[in-house]
Amino acid sequence: MLLKDLAARLHHARIEGDGEIAITGIQMDSRLIKPGELFVCIPGIAGILEDRHDYAEDAVKRGAAALVVEREVQADPRVPRVFVNDARYALATMAALYYGYPSNRLKVIGVTGTNGKTTTSHLIEHILKHRGFRTGLMGNIATRIGEEEKQFANNTQEPPDLQRNLLAMADKQTDYCVMEVTSQGLHMGRVIGTQFRTAVFTNLTQDHLDYHGTMEAYREAKGLLFSRLGNAASADKTFAVLNADDAASGYFAGLTAAQPITYGIGNNADVMAKHIRLTDEGSDFTVVYREEEMEVHIPLVGLFNVYNALAAIAVALIEQLPLTVIAGSLCAMKPVKGRMERLEAGQNFTVLIDYAHTPDGLEEALKAVTAFVRGQVITVFGCGGDRDRDKRPQMGSIAARYSDRIILTSDNPRYEHPDAIIKDICTGLEQSQFPAAHYEMIADRKEAIHRAISIAREDDVVVIAGKGHEAYQLVRGQRFDFDDREAALEALRRLK
């Protein structure tokens, strides 16, 4: 594709140099540039992303055929430049154009919310796949295209990766792509140029305030998925699946022109669950839709997973799947990696690995455990460094409310000292007057997990929270291999 054709999509774009030059790809990371590709100099975000204008010269040395910039840069003046007002917007629109708007060739279902995005996405994808549809998945754990899985740094991918992967799905005749859509991804414009058929909202609780600043700004970022949905008058219907028990749903309903479909337990909704029974083996409930009722079993623990299942059921109903088919597929669902994942090694107590890293996420996980535990609840968790400090004492208070024993440890400390993070969490324990003899501070996460399992007795439940599927730790700018699952299994083997 010619540079001038890409630039033509942007009203304010100004080309300096040869606009007839052929572009063979689009990148925003100079280290990935191949000869003939376009390098987009997106601006930096303090503490999160470096300004790519500083890497223009490196990109040119690696073979960049042209640059998209918001300001002048130090690079070979013979290399064409496209000056734009908003390089992030340019990146998204150019990527969508370059790859031929692949989202138009399949049905894209976006899932957003503070907690539950990954499980809800997997539930939706499982139901559709079980019915015989060809599915693709983009999210926190992996991107799945056909039977191939790939890992990406961001939950919601940057536009070049996102559009390239959508094209790969479309070329494989994929019917549906189920995509997790984060607030940061929305705010950074990563999904601009992607056509969504359905947007799903799980819940809104405190998270990412280090990035958004306030809950109102966080909510507004989530709202971008809904405000861009269904505005075009066309034969294709669009839908907003909203949690009737979360107050933010009213705000999102007012933003969107899509057809709203609600789900819930407490408030009246289009899709509801009643007669809920929660055990350590999963959840049973009766789903009610219009005049139909159907018994449903999901092998997923906790009331929050009933909400996730209801959201997935609502999406499946939109796609005209019968309740009997939906219920049958949910029964065969396997637990999602790192989401209340149960580890079995012949022990006489329960070990659960969960991704809960927010106050609400931790509370929901521990509430789920208290519904069936017969012994003690032993909780192992920490908080991420260089992130929202306000949630640390909150999570300490929540752990104190639902736990009998607590092991405070390191999560991803990044550039903070683990002991300082643990001290912040301790504030919540002290305010809750949690007995000092019942909690320990062990910064080494492996040692903390081993300690928790060593003190567990018959019928106890050990909850290892915060990292879930993640197989690494971020410490002082370095990424180290570490997997809660492997550490726990090693500790369980030692017991024998």
Image (cartoon, rainbow, N blue to C red):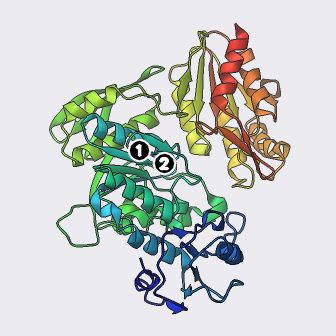
Amino acid type shown at disc 2: Gly
Residue 201: x, y in percent?
40, 53
| 303 on left or right of 393 | left
Whole-Å distance between the Cαs marked 1 and 2? 8 Å
Q: Which mark is residue 291?
A: none
Q: Is residue 266 visible?
A: no
Q: Are marks 1 and 2 in contact (CB under 8 Å)?
A: yes
Residue 341 on image: x %, y %? 53, 28
Q: Residue at x 29, y 30 (%)?
A: 329
Q: Please give the residue where the numbered disc 2 appears in the rendered image.
A: 139
| Circle 1 crowding by C-alpha within 10 Å: few under 14, some 14–19, many from 20 | many
Residue furthest to the top: 496
Residue 127 against residue 369 in the figure, above or below:
below
Quarter of the image for residue 295 reads top left
Which residue in the structure is indicated by mark 1?
121
Where disc 1 sits, the SS reads helix
Is 407 or 105 nearer to us in this picture?
105
- The quarter of the picture where residue 266 lies is top left
Q: Quadrant of the N terminus?
A: bottom left
Number of numbered callouts drawn: 2
**In this picture, residue 11 sits left or right of residue 479:** left
One can see residue 396 in this view:
yes
Of the two numbered discs 1 and 2 on the same chain, state the one appearing first in sequence.
1
Q: Label 2's element?
A: loop
Dot 1 amino acid type = Ser
Between 75 and 119, the one nearer to me in the picture: 75
